[in-house]
Amino acid sequence: MSEVQLENVCFRYGDVVAADNVCLHVKEGEFFAVLGPSGSGKTTVLRLIAGFIEPDSGAIMIGGQPMHNVPPFARHIGFVFQNYALFPHLTVAQNVAFGLESRRVPRDEITRRVRDILAMVQLQGLENRRPSELSGGQQQRVALARALVTQPRVLLLDEPLAALDKKLRTQMQVELRQLQQRLGITTIFVTHDQEEAMTLADRIAVMRDGRVIQVGPPREVYEHPITYFVSDFLGQSNVIVGQVVEKDDRHTVIRARSGDLIYALPETDRAVGEEVMIAVRPEKIRLHAERPETTATVLDGEIEHIAYMGTSLSYHLRRPNGDQMIVFEQSGLHPKPLRVGQRVYLTWEPVHTLILQDEVEAS
Ligand code: ADP
Ligand code: MG
């Protein structure tokens, strides 16, 4: 049993609230990402789980067992630090063997387990090198091998790929995920890179200022962000402020401050008269050269800039009220390509109008 639970965990460094009432339930065997900008409390959460620091209040359970006053070594956790923290004077094999030696595992078993784990992370033949004689990717693998060799029940990874260049990072992402699936080990992975979290994780927790803002599978968090922060941190979005003016069994109708009507699904707890902030993903909007016949949302705007991004195009538009919007479309959608300076019409389906929970500032 290796699920990890945090219940209302708080932790301060002096005046800084680094973990603010954090609740997380990581399931057994899950690959769970903690995503947030620098300083949002990600490392603090890992250090709390590992037992390097104790919560000021709240509880941490691993495998259903309370961890209060359980020292780090007794938690059976593998930790890969942000900077790897390898021992520079030890060889690869010695670095990996370290945790087994301190646990007094017999010598021949250490040799066997070190050999097996180094094979698993593809470091055979490098046993006798020192960290300074390895590439960044190889150092990362040593850190991973060192964390896994003790057969921990939970693996904690603190931005393990941040130091690698883009190509190697992508390759290591795939390897890491495959390794995790092969071992079936409960893994909590910290990153500030939304693409990395989306690619790797079964579920993502988005953090800000020590708080967990939203938890869910990548698709759900992307498609249904609950706040502007989440929608903006995971990709781009267009934000519009307006007032709910009508609700029936087919629609929620919002009058934007620009005066335009925007249609959302009927399922919302927002009442007529309430000010709301909505978001629309750029790839959910379609552009039209002529005003289309539709009962869905139609806005107009002028194309200010078109960026070519290989298979897709990004259009930067200016609304008559001065607002900017961004739209992504596949190339080749329009028989006559749209051009800069052209007036166009933007449409999207009610399902793509995301009503956010943010408070709206008075206009
Ligand atoms: P992240 O890993 O998301 O970048 P951290 O968990 O490292 O964030 O930090 C959360 C907050 O706690 C930040 O405001 C940071 O400055 C503060 N903090 C982290 N470590 C310490 C420390 N040892 N002493 C004082 N403040 C700290
Ligand atoms: Mg950190």
Image (tube, grey):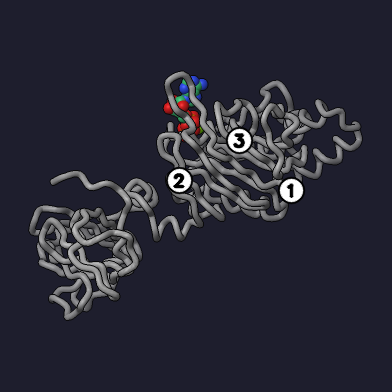
Query: Percent position (x, y) of residue 47?
Result: 59, 31
Tell me the element at label 1. loop
Whether residue 71 can be seen here = yes
Tell me the element at label 2. strand
Q: Is residue 237 left or right of residue 93?
A: left
280 and 359: which is toward the camera: 359
Q: Quadrant of residue 132?
A: top right
Mark number for residue 59? 3
Tell me the element at label 3. strand
Q: Quadrant of residue 16?
A: top left
CB of mark 3 near ligand 1 (< 8 Å):
no
Residue drawn at (71%, 44%) of the image: 63
Residue drawn at (21%, 67%) of the image: 253
**Disc 3 vs disc 2: Cβ atoms closer than 8 Å?**
no
Q: Amino acid at mark 1?
A: Met
Q: Which of disc 2 and disc 3 is earlier in sequence?
A: 3
